[in-house]
Amino acid sequence: MEMRTITSPEVPGTGPYYANAKELTGFSRLLYISGQIPETVDGHVPPDFEDQARLVFGHIRSLLKAANMDVTNLVKLTIYLSDRQYRAALSRVRNENFAGHQFAMTIIITGIYDPIWLLEVEAVAAE
């Protein structure tokens, strides 16, 4: 599979952490990861945003591993935040987990299903 970042001088840049567009060619499979929530297997939800984000990104990494993939296979993240106040913390934790790999990304500020969840993240990966 080849993954290429697409840019245009007519579109604002994204910086080093994500891409406006990714083109995939020669891929053999796609993995759609449902929105992952900040809850442990036993139902615990950490109160701190960064701990919730680490948990959610850990779920994504675990599902990638179960599919014999890793973060370099990520093509797209859609991140739902409960409040824009978490934007800087999200960037820090996202960069801890995915540094060096760009993917297309959308961040939406919205109400989330359970009010104790401060974020939810869905992903698309390809191989």
Image (tube, rainbow, N blue to C red):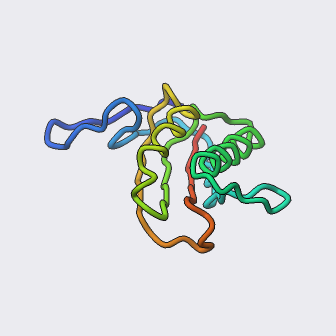
User: Is 37 placed left or right of 95 in the picture?
Assistant: right
**Residue at image point 70% right, 48% down:** 59
Quadrant position of residue 110: bottom left
Image height of 97 relative to 121, above or below:
above
Q: Quadrant of the C terminus?
A: top right
Question: In this view, which residue lies farthest toward the top?
Answer: 100
Relative to the observer, which residue lies in front, 63 or 32?
63
Q: Position of residue 117 (x, y in %)?
A: 61, 64
| Residue, far right | 42
Q: How many labels does the image show?
A: 0
Q: In the image, 24: left or right of 125?
A: left
Residue located 61% across and 52% down the image: 48
Frontmost residue, 9 versus 84: 84
The residue drawn where x is 45% and y is 41% is 91
Residue furthest to the left: 10
Given residues 115 and 70, the one toward you in this image is 115
Q: Residue 83 in the image: x percent, y percent? A: 44, 62
Q: Position of residue 96 (x, y in %)?
A: 56, 32
Quarter of the image with the N terminus is top right
The quadrant in which residue 6 appears is: top left
Q: Which residue is drawn at 54% across and 70% down?
A: 112
Q: Residue 58's x, y, as percent? A: 69, 43
